[in-house]
Image (spheres, rainbow, N blue to C red):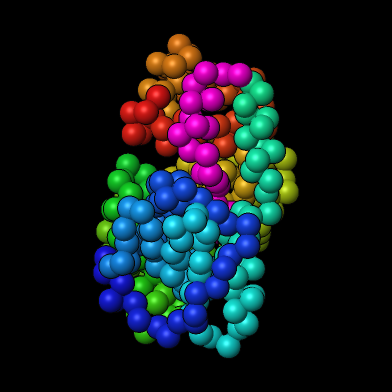
Amino acid sequence: MSNRLYSPKLSEYTKIEGARFTAKDFCETLDGGQAFRWHRTDQFTDATPEYFGVFGNNFAKLKLGSDGQVWGAFRLDGKKISEHAKELAEYLDCGTDYESVRKRLRATRDPAMLRALEIHPSLRILRQNPAEAIICFICSSSKRIVQIKQCVQLLAENLGEELSEGVFALPGFDKIADAPIEVLRSCKLGFRADYLKKSAEKIRRDKFDPMSLRELPYEDAKSYLTSLSGIGDKVADCILLFGASRFEAFPVDTWIKQAMTEIYSTPADAKKIRAFAAEKFGDLSGFAQQLIFAAKRKNLI
């Protein structure tokens, strides 16, 4: 998707405090399957990657300097640039002390984890809006990242608020619940259209606040999510990890199942793999998962 489709007037680039990455980890964090609304700009290079995208009601271009510093330019919408920068810093989870997190994982002295930490020294977990994570990960079932991005973009264009010409926020659950099923299916969702509509209807009926996923006990939060249509254990854990910052959530997909059976000789059973990870990595098992996932996907561990 070319950034020529998106041409709102933007601010000058501003430094995002606390946001530093290697180029590889910047790309992996934004474009490795945690979120689906970021796209490479025409100025993207491997050494200095640059993306454009929407988070919440914010449109931004993000670029990585040669020194690893993240810079952001934002749609001019009357809000102070400092407020945009603060919201982006929260989205990039700049409030978490990742050095302390990495130190705790290094203390496990697990060879595979030490290797993954070496490969990805600045990877982090995005702190997305939980409602957006629910929507995006219901759309993600059995699809590749490029396909998920297309579905999510069509959903925003068909039902979301137009922030400026060509720039759309994701719709809320009311809009999705009220939408004709034909509109949802036109977003290339296939069978996921029914899942998304039924889930939106239940969330509205229950008056459930997705932000509560950050505070509820983990098992209660996961139990509610798996009561929604189209959400099993893996998708629930993706929502909790990438949308609710629940580092104890350990999504098990094909890549992780392969990695855990090969590296740790675990049974090829998702429940047993999650139990093994919880015992080995504790309340950081979700961050450990992302490190292992990223390294294994590139055949580096």
Residue 205 seen anywhere in this rendered image of the structure: no
> Magenta segment: does it hold 237?
no
Is 260 or 61 nearer to us in this picture? Answer: 61
Q: Residue at x 58, y 45 (%)?
A: 240
In this picture, is 301 found above or below 264? below
Where residue 228 sits in the image (x, y, percent)? 52, 47
Residue 234 horizontal/vertical position (percent): 48, 36
Q: Is residue 93 visible?
A: yes
Q: Residue at x 72, y 40 (%)?
A: 217
Question: Quick one: 91 or 24, which is closer to the camera?
Answer: 24
Q: Quadrant of the N terminus?
A: bottom left
Magenta run includes residue 112: yes
Decide if residue 207 is on the left or right side of residue 261.
right
Query: What residue is drawn where x is 28% and y is 76%?
Result: 4
In the displayed structure, does residue 226 sit left or right of residue 221?
Answer: left
Q: Which residues are magenta?
A: 109-131
Residue in the image at 51% along x and 66% along y: 71
Asked which quadrant contains residue 3, the reply is bottom left
